[in-house]
Amino acid sequence: MNKFHEFDYYLIPMKIKKVLLVFLILILSNNLNFSQSLENKNILVVWGGWKGHQPKVFADKVIKWLKSQNAKITESNNLEVYDNYDSLTKFDLIIQSVTLSDISNNQADNLVKAINNGVGIAGAHGGLTDSFRTKTNYQFMIGGQFVAHPGGKVNFKVNMLNDQLTQGLNNFEIFTEQYYMHFDPNIEIIANTTFDNKFYPWIDGVVMPVAWKKKYGKGKVFYISIGHDPNEFIRYPDGWKLLTRGFIWACRN
């Protein structure tokens, strides 16, 4: 074998190795997105609104987990925390559990602007998608709005789709409200459910998102629709894992 052939032989495998190395790094970095902690991240937990969704119970569970992550936590049960835009920009993530509440135009504008400029937001059930029914700019930012839960609490299946946040998670059957949503076609759906004809025959076979992620300007949004009772996240651990992975994903890097 002459020197040209020797050079050619060794050069090609090295290029392949470099490509494989880059590919491996990308895979590992995706996995680390939800295995890393939120240590020293500034996180605002906002709760309130309709008591039927037990927002304080949800907030307490989330705060307990955030403490295990060594996050810097600010808790508020008042939407006045949205009054000052500059204060909101100091947070890396807002976790909101507020249902059927009134928010001022200034508060809604500040919140939307903060997400647009890089703050993340995440939440579950009506605490994020049935918060402020009159504020379409907020709904546009979140990516959807609750409109119905046919039959109230029912048994249905949550299907995990192929995404870095759902890796290793299983589909599961759950008994809770199956949310029917108006949603932005621009969201990235990572879990879904299918409606049957038991209550409304015309929605038989309709596939509806259960969890999504999306970008809004420089910020990121994560949402999961289960959680009418916050203890569902204890009874259905894959739902809790997806939620906490969503917190990490949505948090500003």
Image (cartoon, grey):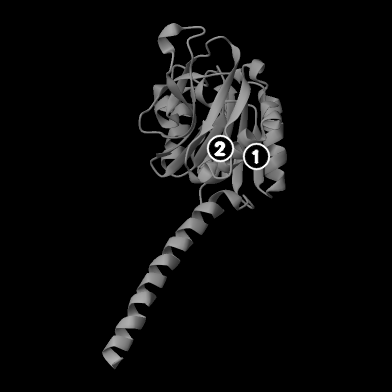
Q: Is residue 134 above or below residue 114?
A: above
Q: Is residue 187 left or right of residue 43?
A: left
x, y percentage for residue 6?
A: 33, 88
The dot on residue 94 is 2
Drawn side of residue 24 relative to residue 174, left or right? left
Disc 2 crowd rating (10 Å Cα; few below 14, some 14-19, many 20+) is many
- Residue 74 is labelled as 1
Q: Between disc 1 and disc 2, whose residue precedes?
A: 1
Q: Which of the labelled discs sits on residue 230, or is there none?
A: none
Q: Amino acid at mark 1?
A: Thr
Instruction: For mark 1, give the secondary structure.
Output: strand
Label 1 Cα crowd, 10 Å radius (few <14 / some 14-19 / many 20+): few
Which of these two is toward me, 9 or 96? 9
| Viewport quadrant of the N terminus | bottom left
Circle 2 sits in a helix, a strand or a loop, which is it?
strand
Residue at coordinates 47% horizontally, 62% vertically from top-left?
24
Q: Are marks 1 and 2 in contact (CB under 8 Å)?
A: no
User: Which percent across, then down, holds residue 133?
Assistant: 47, 17
Instruction: Identify which amino acid the numbered label 2 is placed on.
Output: Ile
Rendered residue at 56%/37% (across/down): 94
From what the image shows, is residue 112 above or below residue 117? above
